[in-house]
Image (cartoon, coloured by chain):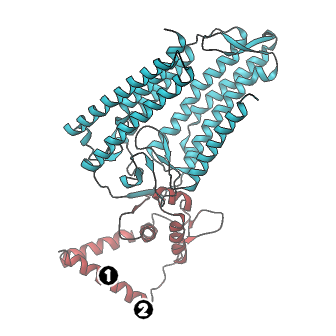
Amino acid sequence: MNVELVMLLFPLALVAVIFQFMPLLTRPGVFFSATVDPQFPRSADGRRLLRSYRGQAALWAVLAIGLALLWLPRRPQLAILSPVLLLVAGTGLSYWLKFREVHARYGQPRREIRQTDLAPQSIGANFTAWLWLPPFVALGVTAVYLQLHWNQLPERFPVHWGADGLPNRWSSRNPLSVYGPVLMGAGMNLFLLALGWLLSRLSRNTVMRRVTVRILEVLLYPLTFSFVMVALLPFGLVVPVWLVPTIMLLFVAGLIYWSYRQITVPASADAVPEPQSDSYWKAGMFYYNPNDPAIFVAKRVGIGYTMNFASKWTWVVLALTLALIVGSIALGRPK
Amino acid sequence: MAGDLTLHVDLDSAVPAYRQIVDGLRILLVNGKLAPGSELPSVRRMALDLGVHFNTVAEAYRTLADEGWLDLRHGRSAMVVYRDAPDPTLRQMDEFRHRLRVLIAEMMAKGAPAAALQVEMRNAAEELES
């Protein structure tokens, strides 16, 4: 099996596995994004619905992998995009049909009771200095090491590698190429922390917010490790191709498991979580509430946040993101 | 600040959110859980947590400031200030009496005995005074 095939099938298989567990990655009292009795998912009907969804999701995964294998020898570009689209759209459709059934037949209305803590709160309290500080220290130590061993650096060294693991771009010894990985690592880390800060300002104080900020803090570690490895490569450090993806995968798997425990265990669930009523959740997935000033709202299923589509700021953010993507593609095209 | 300092709002209730915020905060102010010098959350933070419009919270803060409970200076958090208990006017006393009679009538209509109402009222007054 060649590297290209593995790189194509691995993400597909990973997404397919995540889709299998998605209905369970939710807070108590929510099933297929619909508000239900907390005991319902364990009932006979609940288990039947889950089995049916999983069967359909597995079928979409098989079809997507088949499509990828079909396109790979002829149109490699299509082999990447079209199977992912098929898998997401197909499983999304199955999920939506299950949401409709659960909402219509087993849904339960909930009163919208909200609460606020009147005790002083500080955004900084969401962050844990001993957790996010060490990656920056590691990058600083790396920069100092590079400075002290400047003369041992070769005049020319690889800075980019292909899927086959062989270098395909080189650079000469200059401050930008030597310190570039360290600076990029620091930039990425700051970006993740800024995301956490923004989230702390613009979302409600819930378990999901604490979980998400913690995930962002912990993600600094594999990212920093990757950038430190790249910064030290000019010294002849040999890093197996599989090492960084494996570490990332283990981190992500660990974070998903930890988040699952935090979000789904009733004892640690919010006393009053995010909006309860199904009427705010279009198709069970898209939050639309013109009366809610929150822009970021904890997702009903999975980890992280979605946006309030009734807020004009949501559309401003989406338009800017789209403009950034289109602009990057347009600028990146050869003239 | 001491004790439970959580404010609840039922968005499905017939009572407007503005009224619930004013009533909820006033209870905490009267019983001293929100003591002079305490800072309340910003309008933005409270509106975000409760899922109500910013103006709803701002209006509630203004009402309590008019009653003399809060100091709302521009660019600063709403702060609880010391307030001398005023003497209610005759008109205000009439209004309270009327509201109390309406409430008692509603409770009696739902079966609450007069003796139990007396106990409830005394407990509530003592709780707020302590």
**Mark 1 is on which residue type?**
Leu
Quadrant position of residue A28: top left
Q: Label 2 marks which chain's residue?
A: B
Report the residue at 48% width, 28% height from top: A84
Left or right, B12 with reference to A226: left
The chain that appears red in the image is: B
Question: What type is the residue that disc 2 sits on?
Answer: Leu
Using the image, determine if residue A60 lies above or below residue A267: above
In the figure, residue A18 lies in which quadrant? Answer: top left
Q: Front-most of B86 and B107? A: B107
Does residue A31 show up?
no
- Say which of A220 and B87 sits in front: A220
**Residue A65 pos. (x, y %):** 43, 21
The colour of chain A is cyan
Task: Kindly tell me whether residue A99 is visible in this rendering.
Answer: yes
Q: Are marks 2 and 1 on the same chain?
A: yes
Nearer to the camera, A8 or A77: A77
Residue B66 spot, x, y in % from top left:
54, 77
| Residue position for label 1 | B100
Whether residue A334 is situated above or below residue A170 in the rendered picture = below
Q: Give left or right: position of A109 versus A288.
A: left
**Where is mark 2, residue-wise?**
B90
Please tell me how crowded label 2 is: few (under 14), some (14-19), or many (20+) other residues with Cα within 10 Å: few
